[in-house]
Amino acid sequence: MKNRNLIFATMLLGILFLAAFTSTNNRENKVDEKATTTGQELYRLNCAGCHGVDRKGNPPTYPSLDEIEEKLTATEVRTQIKNGKGFMPPMAHLSDEEIDVITLYLFDENGNEQISSITIYTPEKQGEMVFKSNCAGCHRATINDPTPQNANTQMCSMMEPAVLAGATKRFTKNEFLNILETGPCYMPSFSHMKQEEKETLFAHLKTLEGKEEPGQPSIGKKCWKMRKGKSCCGR
């Protein structure tokens, strides 16, 4: 009887441990699945870095999205957001619902459409999504990643921007946030981003430390102007 009880207790502990591990693993990236956001907020975080908060863009590199209905259909806009086109990288990390709400915002400036059950992630995961939306078109995350579509183009002043693995060792957090705020050299300013969104990007880049970092320091490490968020690039 004692042996049977001991076996039963051992099995029960094993089941409880497995359940706890599975629950923790499933929630590794998720924080809360019941949050609300708007098309305007999704646009600001995913599109405004190039097209501007006011949607005026900076033609011809960053086209204006004003009166988009005169240039593209809603279906064409959805397709372009999802698959990318030209300098614009694909926004494959966005769900179909999020793309739909951004599209509705672009066709209705009030931006009142909402998603009522968007998943909120850990800061590191949020930062990865910010990276994909705002940085991946020009910057590689690690040296072994494919060359971004906008690297070595006129958009990036004909030189590939720095690989971002190791950036959190080359710059302090305040220096990094200042670079995002000011947009030195040919990099656009990301002053439209909230402080916590910039910090999630830094948190994501922290996870890349020691993972396929470049062997040589970037211009940002050599140039004091870049560290201060000022124009560099040999000018």
Image (spheres, rainbow, N blue to C red):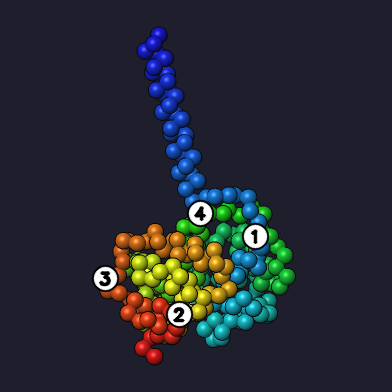
Cα separation between marks 4 and 2: 28 Å
Disc 2 element: loop
> Where on the picture, by quarter, is residue 47?
bottom right
Q: Position of residue 156 (x, y in %)?
A: 43, 82
Disc 1 element: strand
Contact (CB < 8 A) between labels 1 and 3? no
Cα separation between marks 1 and 3: 41 Å
Q: Position of residue 8 (x, y in %)?
A: 42, 18
| Residue beneath disc 4 | 122
Contact (CB < 8 A) between labels 2 and 3? no
Residue drawn at 55 percent across, 75 percent down: 191
Tag 4: residue type? Thr
| Residue beneath disc 1 | 37
| Residue beneath disc 2 | 229
Closer to the chain start, of discs 1 and 4, is: 1
Disc 2 versus disc 3: nearer the observer: 2
The C terminus is located in which quarter? bottom left
